[in-house]
Image (cartoon, rainbow, N blue to C red):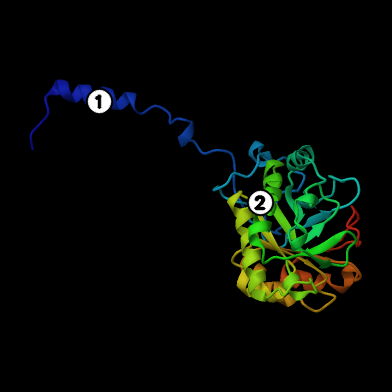
């Protein structure tokens, strides 16, 4: 092997020494940006632990999104003055009525925050209600001022829901809870099929994911086998009362949280089953104010 001249060797050593300085900022590990929340173990940090500065920033499209794990406790409050002091690491709140400042405050308290919006029913009290043409409005869903939507009309509903999800992202929400996702199984006034519902629910999931947010499947138990791969968690009402909680096991077995509430059953009547299935369960009053009784 040919040897290099001594002067050239010294020059190469000098250059190598200059390039061995500290890495620039892009090479340093940043603050903890894990998308997974702590599981229900005794070593998990307290929900009141201050988060890193990155936890209050808006989700970024294309980045790692939050993946809530089974057993996380949560608070679901859609009415009344928001109480940010509940000892739960996850909050699910009304996307229209809660401000960015309130979302930021919850982040500073170490909470992840879910944006509640209705994607399957029209609400006459929302600021964008006038943007929905009458042709997509069906029968009442049983709540005052609400009517089922024709989810076949993705050409109309897709852009409207995209704007709602843009609002959630701009306020800094970590995830979306899209409500009324099972119109096909109700009297909507439209000839909806299971295929129509699957297509629409997957569109809703894509809209959230495209904006860097996690998304939950609300109720729609019969379609869980087809949709568990499209959604990051589930939200369920009254599965214990109706003997349906086993159907939600597909989510927990996949390592995805199931946020569950009962209204008429006291915790003694459902918490044992909830713990066995690793559900995140609590009792709430129907108006979904601040009151809660967790398992």
Q: Which mark is residue 162?
A: 2
Tell whether 220 sits left or right of 282. Answer: left
The x and y percentages for residue 69 are: 66, 60
Nearer-the-camera pick, 283 or 57: 57
Neighbourhood count class around disc 1 (C-alpha, 10 Å): few under 14, some 14–19, many 20 upward: few
Question: Does residue 82 sit above or below 265 in this rendering?
Answer: above
Nearer-the-camera pick, 126 or 224: 126
Nearer-the-camera pick, 220 or 81: 220
Neighbourhood count class around disc 2 (C-alpha, 10 Å): few under 14, some 14–19, many 20 upward: some
* Residue located at (69% from left, 54% from top): 161
Q: Which mark is residue 223?
A: none
Name the residue tied to disc 1. Answer: 13
The x and y percentages for residue 205 are: 63, 59
Q: Residue furthest left?
A: 2
The x and y percentages for residue 285 are: 91, 61
Of badges 2 and 1, the one in the foreground is: 2
Q: Secondary structure at mark 2?
A: helix
Q: Residue furthest bottom?
A: 243
* Residue located at (63% from left, 39% from top): 54
Is there any visible trace of residue 232 in the rendered image? no
Quarter of the image where one finds residue 23: top left
């Amino acid at each position: 092997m040919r040897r290099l001249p001594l002067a050239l060797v010294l020059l190469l050593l000098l250059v190598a020494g200059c390039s061995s300085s500290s890495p620039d900022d892009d090479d340093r590990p940043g603050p903890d940006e894990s998308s997974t929340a702590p599981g229900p173990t005794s070593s998990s940090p307290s929900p009141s632990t201050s988060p890193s500065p990155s936890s209050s920033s808006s989700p970024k499209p294309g980045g790692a999104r939050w993946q809530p794990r089974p057993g996380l406790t949560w608070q679901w409050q859609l009415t009344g003055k928001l109480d940010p002091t509940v000892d739960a690491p996850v909050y699910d709140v009304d996307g229209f009525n809660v401000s960015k400042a309130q979302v930021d405050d919850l982040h500073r308290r170490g909470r992840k925050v879910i944006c509640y919006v209705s994607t399957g029913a029209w609400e006459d009290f929302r600021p964008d209600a006038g943007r929905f043409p009458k042709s997509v409005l069906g029968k009442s869903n049983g709540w005052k001022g609400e009517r089922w939507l024709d989810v076949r009309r993705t050409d109309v509903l897709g852009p409207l829901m995209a704007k709602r999800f843009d609002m959630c992202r701009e306020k800094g929400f970590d995830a979306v809870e899209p409500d009324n996702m099972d119109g096909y199984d109700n009297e909507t006034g439209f000839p909806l099929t299971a295929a129509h519902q699957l297509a629409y629910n997957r569109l809703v999931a894509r809209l959230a994911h495209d904006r860097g947010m996690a998304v939950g499947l609300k109720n729609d138990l019969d379609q869980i086998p087809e949709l568990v791969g499209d959604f990051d968690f589930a939200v369920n009402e009254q599965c214990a009362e109706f003997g349906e909680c086993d159907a939600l096991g597909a989510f927990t077995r996949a390592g995805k949280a199931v946020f569950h509430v009962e209204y008429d059953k006291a915790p003694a009547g459902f918490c044992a089953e909830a713990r066995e299935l690793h559900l995140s369960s609590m009792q709430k009053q129907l108006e979904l104010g601040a009151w809660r009784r967790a398992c």
